[in-house]
Amino acid sequence: MNPTVIPYTEWLAILTALVATGTPGGLWNTASCRLFANNFVPAPGMTLSQLNEATFTGYAAVAITWGTPAYSPAGPAVVTGNLCVFTVGSSPTVFDTIYGYFVTTGTSPQVLLFARQFATPVVLSSAGQICDVVPSYATYFPN
């Protein structure tokens, strides 16, 4: 079966609705950025339980404030969040290798919205090291 194709203009409208206040954007409007510490490759059938959330000293999820959805230079619609900074604490006792980030709703129970694996894992092995993430969701689906 051939894939369903949604035009870029419709994706822009969908992203705009998702990050708006209220329904249906309420779930995305309370989103948090989190790091995963297992070598997991995100796929459409993934579940939240497959991602091992980071536990390094000083780690905490970061609330996301979404920007205004727009078209990327390549054409698809994209929405980008604020810079999320994760810093190893000053007296660390736990370290992690970070393989990527995932975004969840802030509601309970949490819902996994999307995940992205880094091209290269980030090894956090000393006090003060950081892992910066700018969460973004692009509506590009290669054939």
Image (spheres, rainbow, N blue to C red):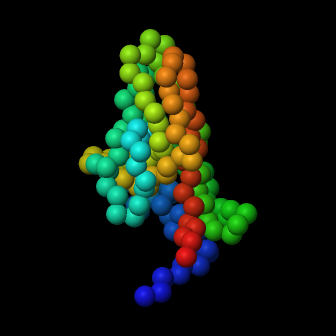
Looking at the picture, does residue 48 appear above or below residue 58? below
Please report the residue visible at 57 percent of the width from the left and 61 percent of the height from the top. Answer: 138
Looking at the picture, does residue 135 appear above or below residue 42? above
Residue furthest to the top: 91
Give percent across and percent down for residue 22: 42, 57
Q: Looking at the image, can residue 133 be seen?
A: yes
Q: Looking at the image, can residue 29 be seen?
A: no
- Count of numbered labels shown in the rendering: 0
Image quadrant for the N terminus? bottom left
| Residue 11: quadrant of the picture | bottom right
Please report the residue visible at 39 percent of the width from the left and 64 percent of the height from the top. Answer: 44
Give percent across and percent down for residue 42: 42, 56
Give percent across and percent down for residue 89: 47, 18
Residue furthest to the bottom: 1
Give percent across and percent down for residue 3: 48, 82
| Residue 7: quadrant of the picture | bottom right
| Residue 36: quadrant of the picture | top left
Please report the residue visible at 42 percent of the width from the left and 24 percent of the height from the top. Answer: 95
